[in-house]
Image (spheres, rainbow, N blue to C red):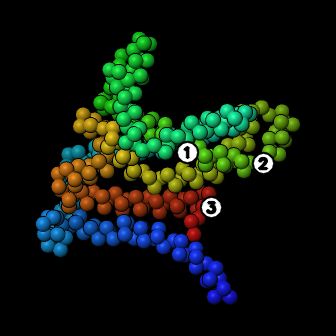
């Protein structure tokens, strides 16, 4: 019996080998470089030849005047992305669910899905052109309505909100798929019973649709807690500039500048290690809450 099941499962295990090898090479082998967080790393001496300094790199990072600003920016932007990133797809899924024309519904779905498949290198250029204070279509519309042009990508007051809105424009269509799938699991008999009882569309949505989506909403919100320290490096790296470091600089961009531009490899690794440890704790808590609240298990 064991041999028979092993022969049946062997092709499936072989299919996993390439992915396993890639993860091992690019995710596990580089973890040996974590030791640089505890060294005064010099590339010419290598990891084994560099001087061991213990937790000095961590002390140095926390002594920097910008560290706490960077932490606040990361938490602020990431939390806004989580809140908006859950509320918008739910609202759009509810609106699409009310459409009776399948042709229009599929067309709208296709249009809102498309930005997800474009990289921030492409979308960054589009956003810079659209939001330009001199020639951007958004500021031209504001001027036509009697307002003043706004430097969305160069004003510290506007930059974090611009990041959140542009990220949501890119991602909300893809996230909507999950909630549309959750809507298909709600029994039509519940709506028929509600109509017999005289319930309108708003009452049906409040008492049937949203409660039916509740397990999926709880699951996705809970799992998103593990992304609190991920504010989106690619997006911010493409869109920000030194004049908005005060409100747009996050942990990942700080690590990039320290490690790649300033050659401070030890402190940069220390920051990355701290982020990884905190993220691991948050993800573990998120999965525990997902299991307790939504009965979600990965094993």
**Circle 2 crowding by C-alpha within 10 Å: few under 14, some 14–19, many from 20:** few
In the displayed structure, 92 sits above or below 140; it is below
Which residue is nearer to you in this view: 166 or 186?
Answer: 166
Disc number for residue 174: 1
| Residue 211 visible | no
Mark before the other along the chain sequence, 3 or 1: 1
| Residue 284 visible | yes
Instruction: Say what secondary structure mark 2 lies in.
Output: loop
Q: According to the image, label 3 marks what residue?
A: 295
Residue at image point 66% right, 49% down: 181
**Circle 1 crowding by C-alpha within 10 Å: few under 14, some 14–19, many from 20:** some
| Image position of 139 (left or right of 55) | right
Instruction: Say what secondary structure mark 1 lies in.
Output: helix
Q: Position of residue 163 (x, y in %)?
A: 39, 37
Evaluate if marks 2 and 3 touch, with contact meaning CB atoms under 8 Å apart: no
State which quarter of the image contains the N terminus: bottom right
In the displayed structure, 131 sits above or below 245; it is above
Which residue is nearer to you in this view: 10 or 151?
Answer: 10
């Amino acid at each position: 019996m064991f041999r028979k099941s092993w022969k049946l499962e062997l092709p499936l295990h072989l299919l996993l080998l390439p992915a396993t090898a890639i993860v091992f090479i690019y995710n596990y082998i580089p973890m040996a470089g974590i030791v640089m967080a505890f060294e005064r790393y010099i590339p010419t001496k290598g990891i084994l030849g560099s001087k061991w300094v213990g937790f000095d790199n961590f002390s140095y990072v926390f002594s920097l005047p910008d560290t706490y600003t960077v932490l606040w920016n990361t938490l602020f932007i990431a939390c806004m992305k989580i809140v908006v990133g859950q509320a918008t797809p739910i609202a759009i899924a509810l609106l699409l669910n009310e459409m009776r024309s399948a042709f229009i519904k599929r067309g709208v779905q296709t249009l809102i899905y498309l930005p997800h498949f474009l990289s921030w290198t492409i979308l960054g250029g589009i956003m810079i052109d659209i939001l330009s204070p001199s020639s951007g279509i958004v500021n031209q519309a504001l001027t036509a309505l009697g307002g003043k042009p706004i430097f969305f990508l160069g004003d510290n007051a506007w930059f974090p909100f611009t990041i959140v809105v542009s990220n949501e424009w890119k991602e909300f269509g893809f996230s909507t798929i999950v909630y549309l799938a959750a809507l298909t699991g709600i029994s039509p008999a519940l709506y028929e019973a509600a109509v017999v009882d005289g319930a309108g569309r708003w009452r049906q949505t409040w008492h049937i649709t949203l409660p039916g989506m509740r397990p999926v909403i709880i699951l996705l919100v809970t799992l998103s807690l593990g992304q609190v320290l991920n504010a989106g490096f690619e997006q911010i790296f493409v869109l920000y500039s030194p004049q908005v470091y005060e409100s747009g600089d996050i942990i990942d961009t700080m690590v990039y500048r320290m490690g790649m531009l300033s050659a401070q490899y030890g402190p940069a690794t220390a920051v990355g290690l701290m982020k990884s440890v905190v993220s691991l704790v948050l993800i573990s808590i998120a999965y525990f809450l997902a299991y307790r609240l939504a009965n979600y298990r990965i094993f």
